[in-house]
């Protein structure tokens, strides 16, 4: 398998999940600025959407969208318990988290990274995202991870997106449960391996 990624982008989430899974894969750098691979290949010829992540399977089939990719990976290694079984209420809870992170947090950060976005819009976006993260902080009360005391795929997505706060001016220092969660995630060997591979950890 190949994972097309850009350092620190939302593709860090499936990158972490792949490291947790133990599955063999090749990380392929796809710049979100130039939309080119290292060898000069036009990334749009691989993913017409032009963004990461994209998972290319060994049979050549390609899967896009982070929430779909992380569930696919989890289902390849059920013994790793990266996601509950399909059809269970717990699986729908996992999908509930992935959808929330995707639409309310991930997309909420977008205005802060959009060139030319007026500062007033960024101020509003920061306040909205912080409100959503405050709710997440409450959900983490008494829990190690989003789904309880064991890691599952939404944790990688939350970790990735919450990390953007330091670059976007969203201060989570007052959210003690989220801060503890981020530290817990940062200590995981799979997270460290993904960060090192992306050049984000020395």
Image (cartoon, grey):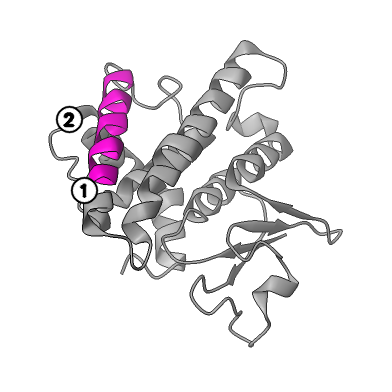
Residue 152 as seen in the image, left or right of residue 105: right
Residue at position x 44%, y 45% from top?
107
Inter-mark Cα distance, 2 to 1? 23 Å
- Secondary structure category for the residue under label 1: helix
Residue at position x 60%, y 44% from top?
21
Q: Which stretch did the figure color magenta?
A: 124-139
Per the image, the residue denoted by label 2 is: 176
Please name whichever residue, 156 or 136, is drawn nearer the observer in this view of the structure.
136
Q: Which quadrant of the structure image shows residue 71? A: top right
Above or below 92: residue 200: below
Tag shown at residue 145: none
Residue closest to the far bottom: 40
Above or below 150: residue 57: below
| Magenta highlight on residue 128 | yes
Please name whichever residue, 19 or 171, is drawn nearer the observer in this view of the structure.
171
Evaluate whether residue 160 shows in this view: yes
């Amino acid at each position: 398998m190949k994972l097309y990624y850009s350092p620190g982008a939302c593709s860090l989430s499936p990158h972490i999940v792949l490291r947790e899974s133990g599955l063999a894969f090749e990380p392929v750098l796809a710049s979100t600025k130039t939309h080119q691979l290292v060898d000069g290949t036009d990334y749009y010829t691989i993913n017409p959407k032009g963004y990461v992540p994209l998972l290319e399977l060994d049979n050549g089939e390609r899967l896009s969208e982070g929430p779909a990719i992380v569930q696919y990976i989890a289902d390849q290694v059920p013994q790793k318990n990266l996601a509950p079984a399909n059809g269970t209420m717990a699986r729908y809870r996992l999908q509930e988290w992935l959808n929330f992170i995707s639409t309310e947090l991930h997309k909420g950060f977008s205005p802060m990274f959009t060139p030319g976005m007026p500062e007033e819009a960024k101020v509003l976006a920061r306040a909205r995202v912080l409100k959503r993260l405050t709710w997440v902080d409450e959900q983490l009360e008494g829990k190690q991870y989003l789904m309880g005391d064991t890691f599952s795929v939404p944790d990688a997505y939350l970790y990735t997106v919450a990390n953007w706060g330091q670059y976007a001016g969203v201060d989570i220092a007052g959210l003690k449960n989220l801060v503890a969660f981020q530290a817990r995630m940062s200590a995981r060997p799979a997270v460290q391996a993904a960060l090192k591979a992306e050049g984000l950890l020395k």
